[in-house]
Image (spheres, rainbow, N blue to C red):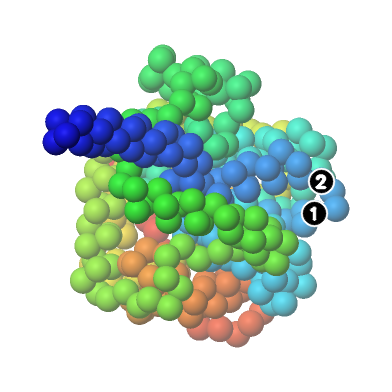
Amino acid sequence: MSKRIVILFCITSILLFILIKLFAIYSFEYVPNRMATIWKLQSNISKNYRNNMPLNIIVGSSRTLALKPHLLESLSEQKFMNLSAPSAKIPYVYYTLKRIIDNNVKVNNIYIDIPASNNIKLGEFEVFLRYFINENELKEYKLYSQNSEITYDNTRKFGKNYVTKDLSVLLRGYLFKKNENKLYRDILINNLGYTLIGDPNRKSNKNESLKYRKIIENLTKNEVPKIQEIYLKKIIDLLETNNISYKFFFSPFPKISKKVPNLGLGNYINLLNIIPSQNINLNSLLLEEDLFIDGSHPNLKGKDEFNKYFAQEILGVKLNEQFELYSINIKKAKN
């Protein structure tokens, strides 16, 4: 009898293990949750962008998601769409804009933020390849990528990390998936692409902010990957060929970043020399540390300051606001 119980227990355990792994695979779309949702959303928007949508476009990474189109409209009387995505790299900016232009949308102005973290060696950024890039885009991307083993099918396969997730993580992801459509509506319809990453009420501190800047400083000591330079040039060529007005800008930094030479941008600044001087604002907004969630992303109050800065300093709206600015010295990057 006890032997039968042991055998039954073993069989049950094996079946349970298999079910958990199957659930992990089934939950592949859920595990990245909010980040994956935003990437899928932005991919769908860029593919289906039409002339009845706002013709002033903001594109960048998660820090730029804090620019709120409705707030900017109230400040500037211009309509915007925010197509930024978490941890977006320069190729994402290019393909987003190319899709819109290929749809024959008559865009008025493009505002692009390319943060210093883009100097991190690209590798094969998983969410970009998995949720955004299409098969034809991937063929072009492979021409410049150092990874010759990338295939469209491989980018859609389940990574090992997704089948070893803790069950509680998978369950939370499943529950998140149930509310994904609501998130789509909130971000796209209600906020035109605006959303904050993390707890919007959290306040960072000086130590946390300085630690983050030191991380960026270490990352930007590396040589800028060639693929970054290639795609930045492709962005500029795309916009100028189509006679589209564009401006590059920086998202805000914590004030303590002043303690790090040139805000810790390092070799990343070499990319800025590619951009025509009339198309880039080299002044960066400095905000108090408690206006950030984590030393990088603006919180609710930081978002308001960022939007006012953007309206006044980038769009040229006269708001009579006083901001502390740091002027980036691109000559230092050439030394």
Q: Name the secondary structure under disc 1.
A: loop
Q: Position of residue 196 (x, y in %)?
A: 50, 66
Residue at the disc numbered 1:
53
22 and 153: which one is in front? 22
Locate the C terminus and report the quarter of the image it occupies: top left
* Residue 269 at least partly seen: no
Residue at image position (50%, 83%) is 322
Residue at image position (40%, 48%) is 170
Tell me, for residue 246, which label it has, or none.
none
Distance of label 2 from label 1 (alpha carbons): 6 Å
Tell me, for residue 50, which label it has, or none.
2
At label 1, which amino acid type do we have?
Answer: Met
Residue at image position (68%, 35%) is 98
Q: Residue furthest top?
A: 148
Is 101 positioned to the left or the right of 248 in the image?
right
Quarter of the rendering containing residue 16: top left
Q: Name the secondary structure under disc 2.
A: loop
Q: Is residue 214 above or below residue 312?
A: above
Q: Position of residue 53 (x, y in %)?
A: 80, 54
